[in-house]
Image (cartoon, helix red, strand yellow):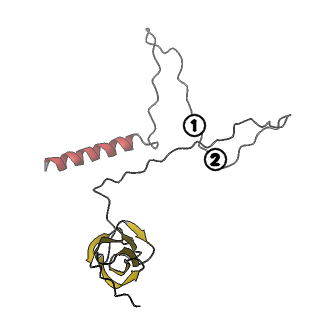
Amino acid sequence: MLRRSVLWLAIFALIAVASACSSGNPQPPAVPPTTAGGSQAAPPTNTLPPAAPTNTPAQTAPTAEPPQPTKTSAPTATPTRTPRPRLTPATVRPRSTATPLNVSYEVAEIKREPGERAVLVLKVYATGGSGGYRYYHDDIQQPSATFNIPGICGKPFVHTIKVTSGDGQTVAVPYHVNGVCPTPTP
């Protein structure tokens, strides 16, 4: 309750000071100094307040010579770097993804090549993420989702498939396929 009283007192004091200082209240005339004998040194003079502005344009007296242009320097642009707020790791938001990235594969076939060589044809399937998949075989980017992997007949194919989606998700899947080649036809 004391705070409220003090607040009202302060508001009343501000209103009183503002109304006393407004232009509607004339100031009392200054008292001229007196001499030692008690008489005034000069009679008081009346002064007029400044004239109120009018809306009529001021007339300028004609001059003999026309106005001369003044030389001013043209403004120049000064490059200024605008500071940008830095994002701290705590405020960086991860890209939102609808579903997690899933990777699977299918062995399409193993082809026999001359000299006991083999080629494994592997199809990779990716789902989820945001699409825009990039396919890797042992960290080497592949042009498509079908891989042709060279090997030797009778030896297993042991490698890693990696898929990265457009939203930054990455899944790596190791695989092991027996290198059984088809019997050669005569």
Quadrant where the C terminus is found in the figure: bottom left
Q: Residue at x 37, y 43 (%)?
A: 18
Farthest bottom residue in view = 186
> Mark 1, residues whose alpha carbon is within 10 Å: few (<14), some, or many (≥20)?
few
> Mark 2, residues whose alpha carbon is within 10 Å: few (<14), some, or many (≥20)?
few
Most foreground residue, 99 or 10: 99
Q: Which quadrant of the figure has residue 62?
A: top right
Give the vertical position of 73 relative to 101 (above or below): above
Farthest right residue in view = 64
The amino acid on which the numbered mark 1 sits, given as a three-letter code, is Pro
Give the vertical position of 71 relative to 34 (above or below): below
Q: Could you say which disc has been placed on residue 54 in the image?
A: 2
Q: CA distance from mark 1 to mark 2?
A: 12 Å
Q: Residue at x 38, y 87 (%)?
A: 184
x then y, percent, for residue 41: 51, 14
Mark 2: secondary structure: loop
